[in-house]
Image (cartoon, rainbow, N blue to C red):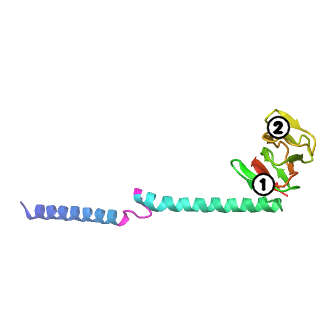
């Protein structure tokens, strides 16, 4: 082999090594950079998802508090009670329960009369009738529903107990 061929082969090998070395260096330095990001599943599950969840929960809680405050300022003096199921409410003589639409009331002990300004005051779900006049005595163990906001009941005896479900205020 001539000296020129050996030099050409050595130069070709040197050029190939330099090319491979340069490409490897470039690949290693750009691996996982901002221009070529690498995100693992463990990063998504352990870091990113919990961070997003906490930000969303914080935003929801802040908005809920804001809405509750706006409701309270729009409805001053209301201390409304809201139950998902029936609860026992004990009333003194003369106490009035002012209800939202859909509240259900069942007189159990003592006596109550219908209250409110709008007609019909209540609907008797037990027999399907309506209670039109304010001051009408309500039957014990009958289920009544408020269909107009602001209507309700008034206790006419001490230690009166009613079952109630829904949003109401006692005055």
Q: Nearer the viewer, residue 100 or 110?
A: 110
> Which numbered disc flags the more N-terminal residue, 2 or 1?
1
Residue receiving disc 2: 124
Q: Dot 2, crowdedness within 10 Å: few (<14), some or many (≥20)?
A: many
Regarding mark 1 in the picture, which secondary structure is present there? strand
Q: Nearer the viewer, residue 14 or 153?
A: 153
Residue under the point 39% across and 63% down? 32
Q: Is residue 163 above or below residue 170?
A: above
Q: Does the rendering let one see residue 40?
A: no
- 28 relative position to 133: left or right: left
How many marks on residues? 2
Task: Give the farthest residue toward the top.
Answer: 128
Toward the viewer: 85 or 54?
85
Q: Is residue 91 left or right of residue 21?
A: right
Q: Main secondary structure of the magenta part?
A: loop
Vertical side of 94 occupied by 15: above or below: below
- Distance (Cα) linking label 2 and label 1: 21 Å
Horizontal and vertical percent position of residue 131: 88, 39
Residue 36 in magenta?
yes
How far from the left and from the top, in percent, is residue 121?
Answer: 88, 43
Where residue 111 sits: x, y (%)? 85, 47
Q: Residues within 10 Å of mark 1 (few under 14, many from 20)?
A: some
Give the residue displayed 87% in from the left and 51% down from the top: 154
Within the magenta stretch, is there residue 9? Answer: no
User: What residue is shown with label 1?
Assistant: 90
Which image quadrant for residue 39? bottom left
Query: What is the magenta range?
Result: 29-41
Judging from the image, what secondary structure is the residue with disc 2 in?
Answer: strand
Quadrant the C terminus occupies: bottom right
Q: Quadrant of the N terminus?
A: bottom left
Q: Quadrant of residue 92?
A: bottom right
Provide residue 48's location: percent of width, then percent of height.
Answer: 48, 60
């Amino acid at each position: 082999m001539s000296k020129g061929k050996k030099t050409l082969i050595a130069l070709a090998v040197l050029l190939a090594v330099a090319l491979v070395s340069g490409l490897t260096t470039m690949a290693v330095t750009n691996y996982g950079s901002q221009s070529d990001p690498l995100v693992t599943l463990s990063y998504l599950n352990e870091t990113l998802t919990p961070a997003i969840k906490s930000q969303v929960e914080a935003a929801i809680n802040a908005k809920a508090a804001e809405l509750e405050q706006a409701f309270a300022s729009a409805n001053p003096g209301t201390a409304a009670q809201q139950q998902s199921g029936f609860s026992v409410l004990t009333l003194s003589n003369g106490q009035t329960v002012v209800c939202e639409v859909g509240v259900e009331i069942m007189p159990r002990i003592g006596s109550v009369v219908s209250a409110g300004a709008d007609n019909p005051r209540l609907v008797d779900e037990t027999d399907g009738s309506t209670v039109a006049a304010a001051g009408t005595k309500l039957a014990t163990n009958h289920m009544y529903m408020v269909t107009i906001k602001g209507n309700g009941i008034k206790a006419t005896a001490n230690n009166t107990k009613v079952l109630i479900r829904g949003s109401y205020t006692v005055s």
